């Protein structure tokens, strides 16, 4: 399962933003161009940053915009834009093993796969925590760069996450053909959010005003064959269980048991 977190203010059209910034640069004097990679001798103009763009002043007085398809900066109090660092750094907080290094939202991973707060996301006054029901207390995380893995979170299943500039990506790796149908239950704890399941199978977690804060895209799975067989035959269901909201992910057992399947199979890799 992938959860993509991103304050909606970050989800802008990069090209439109870059053109606006270049117009501002032009008002400072000089000509302008947009391309990837800073030219030799270029000096970044931090005051012209936005979520997806850097602007450089070139030695000849012109300006160059470096445009990215994902956020590279986050905004801090006072309005300045700082560099995003999605690297996972060790955390000193109780029960927390790692957290993202620098971003406009907080992303934390627990010291055991069995923690009810396995993953914690917070942005402003909104927060989401979730666990994986039945996960092994012996499964502890290994992190490298922006990746973290809980090996054998279930018998024969590894649980991995990637810290991203705009959120977090989750993957369940089923290492061999299961003996029985699989189902994964994720108890959710929401602060300032309400769930809204969409017709396309995704789940939107929205503020009281209906603004999307977090989004859980529809699930997919892919096998390890050369053709990388892909299936969308999975479903999400949302239900309250003794007062706890639970998101259940159920992959199609027929697809998993197909003799043509090549393992391992990765669930929700996209």
Image (tube, helix red, strand yellow):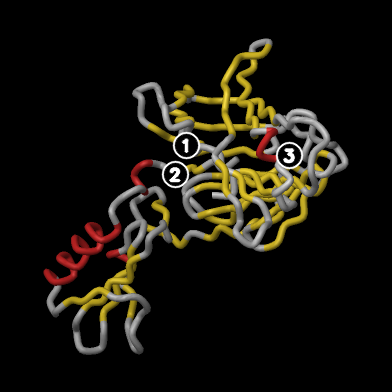
The residue mark sitting in front, 2 or 3, is 3
Residue picked out by circle 2:
6
Q: Position of residue 97 (x, y in %)?
A: 74, 48
Q: Is residue 27 left or right of residue 179?
A: left
Q: Residue furthest right?
A: 138
Can residue 69 be seen here? The reply is yes
33 vs 76, left or right, is: left
For marks 2 and 1, the one nearer the N-term is 2
The Cα atoms of the two marked residues, 3 and 1, are separated by 30 Å
The outermost residue toward the top is 242
Q: Return the x and y of residue 154 as percentages of the image width and height.
A: 81, 39
Residue 26: x and y, percent? 14, 72
Q: CB atoms at circles 2 and 1 under 8 Å apart?
A: yes
Asked if residue 186 is positioned above or below residue 25 in the image, the reply reads: above
For disc 1, the marked residue is 215
Quarter occupied by residue 237:
top right
What label does residue 257 carry, if any? 3
Do residues under tags 3 and 1 come within 8 Å of each other at their CB atoms? Answer: no
In which quadrant of the rendered view does residue 21 lie?
Answer: bottom left
Q: Secondary structure at mark 2?
A: loop
Q: Earlier in the sequence, mark 2 or mark 3?
A: 2
Residue drawn at x 57%, y 48% is: 230
């Amino acid at each position: 399962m992938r959860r993509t977190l991103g304050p909606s203010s970050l989800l802008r059209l990069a090209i439109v933003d870059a053109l606006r910034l270049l117009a501002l640069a032009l008002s400072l004097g000089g000509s302008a161009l947009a391309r990837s990679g800073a030219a030799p001798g270029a000096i970044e103009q931090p005051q012209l940053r936005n979520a997806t763009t850097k602007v450089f002043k070139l030695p000849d007085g012109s300006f160059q915009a470096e445009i990215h398809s994902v956020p590279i900066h986050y905004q801090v109090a006072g309005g300045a834009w700082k560099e995003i660092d999605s690297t996972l750094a060790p955390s000193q907080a109780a029960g927390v093993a790692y957290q993202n290094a620098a971003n406009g939202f907080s992303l934390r991973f627990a010291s055991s796969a069995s923690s009810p707060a396995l993953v914690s996301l917070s942005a402003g006054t909104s927060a989401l925590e979730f666990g994986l029901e039945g996960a092994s207390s012996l499964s502890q995380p290994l992190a490298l760069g922006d990746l973290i893995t809980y090996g054998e979170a279930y018998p024969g299943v590894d649980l991995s996450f990637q810290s991203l500039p705009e959120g977090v990506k989750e993957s369940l790796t089923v290492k061999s053909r299961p003996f029985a149908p699989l189902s994964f239950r994720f108890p959710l704890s929401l602060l300032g959010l309400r769930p809204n399941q969409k017709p396309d199978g995704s789940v939107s977690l929205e503020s009281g005003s209906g603004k999307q804060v977090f989004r859980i895209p529809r699930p997919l799975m892919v096998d390890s064959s050369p053709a990388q067989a892909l299936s969308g035959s999975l479903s999400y269901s949302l239900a309250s269980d003794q007062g706890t909201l639970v998101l259940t992910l159920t992959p199609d057992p027929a697809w998993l048991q197909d003799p043509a399947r090549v393992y391992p199979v990765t669930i929700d890799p996209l």
